[in-house]
Structures are given as structure tokens and as C-alpha cells.
Amino acid sequence: MVFPTDENVIVGLDRADDAGVYRISDDLALIQTVDFFTPIVDDPYWFGQIAAANALSDVYAMGGTPKTAMNLVGFPIKSMDIGILRQIIQGGVDKLTEASTVLIGGHSIEDKELKYGLSVTGFVHPARVLTKKNLQAGDQLILTKPLGTGIINTAIKGGLASDELIDTVTRLMATLNRDAAEVMMNFPVHACTDVTGFGLLGHLAEMVAGSGLGVHIQANRVPILKEALEYAAMGLIPAGMYKNRKFREYMVDFSTSVDILIQDVLFDPQTSGGLLICVAQDSSKDLLYRLKEKGILWAEIIGEVRTEPKEKIKII
């Protein structure tokens, strides 16, 4: 299939990335993205916040600043109180306000299943666009949020999670990646993505594919919510994890020392996950320090880019 394009498209459909980027002038480009999904938490206000944070994240991952947004709503008006939708929209609006992003419109339809999300437009200098496709040998990989939200959300749906854990995970998913993005822009970052539905290894595979390089990940350095391992041991694995593993397992080589539960979490689909930042080796520790100084306490250096194995991910 041939898609329409022109010379000002910096990032388009010819490669997998977090958002599209279109050059407006020599010093301005637009980042455009869209994302929506069904509720992952029971509280409508928090669902709105999480959906907004998730949609905004793609702009941050591309090195940009979100500026405007438009709501996307599917709502079962005949079977659900309209007050629920108002709470969802309020959650989204409050998160946009936190991100200094303006809501300028939207579209809604009647749907049998509730859905909410946003299309977001951001600004970036054309020379400062970050993509998934610029790994360099020796670069270090930093992850800014812990893994395990997919597994824990499965436990929540099963009524097994405590109120305290629900609150912790909800706030984690609703946290903007803005601060991490602002910090990383002061360092020689070569590539970036946000970790969402394909899981850490799925999104990392997109970075590795076609690069001619490989990645080594130290499993014991990956930040993981401990409850996710506990629930994984109980078999509370989302269907998306199995799909992610099946799709990308040919690119992944696990050391025999890596526990199967950790393997599951590395493929676990995340909602509004953290940034996966690829930064020059001599700047990685300073970047990590600045992230933690900014309050991003889960951030860790989890691995590095190497020349071998080519276009593979080795977990040790």
C-alpha cells in the first residue's frame, strides 16, 4: 500500500514510531498522535487522567512539547449515566491543564463500549526530533517508570488488589512523562520511545529492528513493581503479554538465569508507561542523577547498545 506523503514529512508511516512529525518551517515541526482505549480503572475521573497522560506521552517521547488536544469519546448513552462521562472528561481536562496543553475540540459517538482518549499536537524543532531509530553502539538505556501495570490491572479486575496498590498504580499511570522529557533534552539522547502496549521488549524490538545493532539488558536492574511478580506467579497474566511474547520472541535471547516471571513482566503490556531513553554512555549517570533529582525515583540504567548480537535483545 502506498501512502500519500511529501518532502516535509520527517516521521511518517514508512517506519514504526510514536507519532508523526511534519516540518512547518526551518525551526518548527508539528508532532501529531492519537490514542484511546477502554477503561482500565473503575474510577472515571482517574481513567480520564490516565488516558490523557497516555496520549500526551508520545509527544514527550519524540522530544516535543504538547500544545493542543482534541477529545475522542465512545459512550453508551442508553445504558450509562452521562455524569460518568463528565467525570472522565474532567480528568482529561485536569491532566491537560497540568501539561499546559489546550483542549480545542473533539468528537463523540454512541458506542456499546465506553472509550476515551485524545489526539494531541505538539511542537518540536526539526533538528531535535527524537525517534526510535538512532541507536549508537555504547549508548546506555534508561527506563523511567517501573513495569508490571498490565499484570496488576489484571489482578485489579479480579478483585485481588488492595486499595493501597490500586492507588499506587493508578497514580503511576496518571503521571506525565513531562519531567523526564524536560530533563533528557539537556543530554545527548540519541533515541527514545515510551513503553506502552507492546511491553518493554516489544518497544525495544522496534528500536533494534533495522539498526544493525543489538541490546543487552540486565534483568536485575529493570524497575519492576514487586506485586506484579507475585500476581504473575499466581497466573494473573494479561492476554496481551502472550501476544507480545509470540510476536517478538524470535528477537529475544534470555539467559537461563532469568526467572520466567521476570520474562513475563518484560513482555507485560503497559498503560502510560515510562520513557525508554537511549543516551551517550559518558552522560548516562549524570542523566540518571538529574532524573532522580527531579523526583523520578524509579529511573534506572537497565542496559546498553552493543554491536552484537545484531538486531537481537539479550537478557542477562
Image (cartoon, helix red, strand yellow):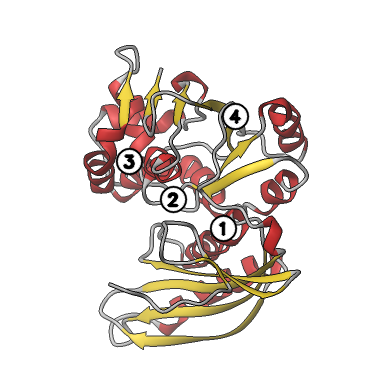
How far is disc 3 from disc 4 in space, using C-alphas?
37 Å
Q: Secondary structure at mark 3?
A: loop
Q: Which residue is mark 3?
A: 160
Image location (x, y in percent) of residue 280: 67, 32
The picture quadrant where one finds residue 190 is top right
> Which amino acid type corresponds to the residue marked 1 in the rendered image?
Ser
Above/below status of 96 relative to 275: below
How far is disc 4 from disc 1 in space, using C-alphas?
21 Å
Left or right relative to 295: residue 148 = left
Image location (x, y in percent) of residue 44: 46, 67
Of callouts 3 and 4, the N-terminal one: 4
Q: Which residue is mark 2?
A: 196
Image location (x, y in percent) of residue 99: 69, 64
Q: Secondary structure at mark 2?
A: loop
How dense is the environment of label 4, judged by Cα within 10 Å: few (below 14), some, or many (20 and up)? Answer: many
Q: Nearer the viewer, mark 4 or mark 1?
A: 4
Task: Identify which residue, 22 or 141, lies in the foreground.
Answer: 22
Q: Mark 3 near mark 4, Cβ–Cβ under 8 Å?
A: no
How far is disc 2 from disc 1 in space, using C-alphas?
10 Å
How dense is the environment of label 1, judged by Cα within 10 Å: few (below 14), some, or many (20 and up)? Answer: many
How far is disc 1 from disc 3 in space, using C-alphas?
29 Å
The picture quadrant where one finds residue 115 is bottom left
Q: Mark 1 near mark 3, Cβ–Cβ under 8 Å?
A: no
Q: Which residue is mark 1?
A: 57
Residue at 36% from the left image edge and 31% from the top image edge? 312
Of callouts 1 and 3, the N-terminal one: 1
Residue at 56% from the left image edge and 72% from the top image edge? 120
